[in-house]
Amino acid sequence: MKRILLWVFGAAGIFLTALFYFLALRVQGALKFLLLLPDAGIVIFVLLLLVSLIEIAVMTFALRRLAKLVPFRMLCVIAGGYVAFAGMYAVVYALLVPETRGIQILAALCVVRWFTLWLIRV
């Protein structure tokens, strides 16, 4: 039962990621004047992708440790925020680079984050 509740909070995080994704589409390229090099967009995408992938591993480990230390309700809220944070990477990328594919890839990592919630013992 607890695992299902944790997954429901993860699904709420996916919903928040979808909201961040739609926000990212609205503000697409708002700060692109800050990029002086034409190929800087791919560098920013790779950096954000790597940070997001590393964060998945670190947060999975941290959530496994937190499951023993914090109340279950708090763990559910943290897990939902962890899944939703993939949308923040999409928003940051969208502000700097007006490319929809990169926004979609960064936001889609929320599904990977959601699946990693199965690794948490509750």
Image (cartoon, rainbow, N blue to C red):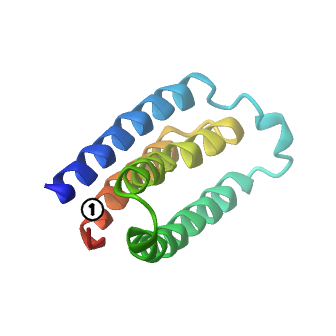
Give the percent coordinates (x, y) of residue 87: 50, 43
For label 1, the crowd category at 10 Å Cα-Cα, with few meaning under 14, some 14 to 19 and many 20 or more, is few
**Residue at which label 1 appears:** 115
Numbered marks: total: 1
Which image quarter holds the C terminus? bottom left
Residue at the image point whose x is 27% and y is 62% from the top: 115
Position of the N terminus, as image quadrant, is bottom left
Is 40 in front, or is 18?
18
Most foreground residue, 2 or 41: 2
User: Is 46 on the left-hand or right-hand side of 19?
Assistant: right
What secondary structure is marked by label 1? Answer: helix
Name of the residue lying farthest toward the left: 1
Residue found 63% across the figure and 45% down from its top: 93
115, 42: nearer the viewer = 115
Image coordinates for residue 25, horizontal then vertical, percent: 53, 28
With respect to residue 25, does 13 lie above or below?
A: below
Residue at image location 45% in from the left, 70% down from the top: 69
The residue lying furthest to the top in this view is 26
x, y percentage for residue 100?
50, 38
Please provide percent x and percent y for residue 7.
Answer: 24, 52
Q: In this view, does 117 lie to the left or right of 59?
A: left
Going by the numbered disc 1, the residue's amino acid type is: Phe
Q: Is residue 35 left or right of residue 30?
A: right
